[in-house]
Image (tube, grey):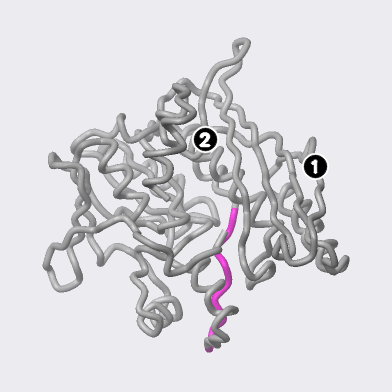
Amino acid sequence: MRRLLDELIAPALCFPNLDMQHDGASFALAGARLAFTTDSYVVRPLEFPGGNIGSLAVTGTVNDLAMCGARPKFLSLGLILEEGLDFELLQRVLASVREAAVEAGVEVVTGDTKVVDHGKGDGIYINTAGIGLREHDLRLGPERVEAGDAVLLSGDLGRHGIAIMAVREGLEFENPVASDAAPLHEPVLAMLAAGVTPHCLRDATRGGLASALVEIAAGAGLELAIDERAISVCAEVRGACELLGLDVLHVANEGRFVALVPEAQVEDALACLRACSVSREATRIGTVRPGRGRVVLRTTVGLERPVEMLTGAPLPRIC
């Protein structure tokens, strides 16, 4: 996917805002500071513990805007439905769209519906676009990261990917794992309102925490030193990863994000994050230091190893 974006799609389009390589674009229009994003959702199965494709589409789009430091306001909803789709399932998905939108304080203001032949659409595909307001003039991105910045993580890892995989593989846990999908704008806006000035925000979705950190390190041209002991993983997720041969750092999340903030603001940032239910387990997991644009993980036994971006797709169709 990274090669496809870097070597084909971006060069073919060649628009300046695409050079930011962020999940959303930030720009000014008629005096307003806006953020804009779009995404498509092809998750399988359509329903999973903790949500379904409808709630996931809203949450994912809201979170892309949040990572721009924006207050989400408006969404579009494009539905591609397969002929023969069960109407009760569609009703549940649409009810989840509305519920998730109300929770996030956004409004679906436009949309489109298409029906494709049976066997051509895998039930439901959803495309969304989102518009948000940026109530600040901060630039957020890897290029703003500085040596000495702290790396904060908003919560434990791996719940979304393992919730999806458990349904596919018929895995059962003593304590069932539900997706962590949740809107993230509240803790981001709380930090900004408190005067915290993050240098970069990134949600740990496809490719997990590892891919998010590697992208930031590469864009900053600095080294991110991460402490594995500071990364929280629940017992069920850890056990499932060991059983399936997965690295939890590569497992997708839909309600977790990374914030890189100045050292002097760490305590204020953590206080803001921990005051919000979705990020109440936020912790510091590392520090930015001079280096060659890479991520280094200090393991639980005290050794250091490089962290690489996810290659391939051991957990396909998770969002």
| Three-letter residue code for mark 1 | Asp
In which quadrant will I find the C terminus? bottom right
Depth check: 45 or 208 in front? 45
Query: Which residue sits furthest right?
Result: 87
Which quadrant holds residue 301?
bottom left
Q: Which residue is drawn at 35% across and 64% down?
A: 249
Q: Which residue is drawn at 27% across and 44% down?
A: 150
* Residue ID for mark 1: 112
Q: Which mark is residue 1?
A: none
Q: Position of residue 9 (x, y in %)?
A: 46, 37
Q: Is residue 87 above or below residue 170?
A: above
Q: Give the SS element for disc 1.
A: strand
* Residue ID for mark 2: 24
178 part of magenta stretch: yes
Depth check: 250 or 104 in front? 250
Q: In this view, does 237 lie above or below 274?
A: below
Q: What stretch is highlighted in magenta?
A: 174-182
Q: In this view, does 136 lie above or below 258?
A: above
Depth check: 195 or 169 in front? 169
**Which comes sooner in the sequence, label 2 or label 1?**
2
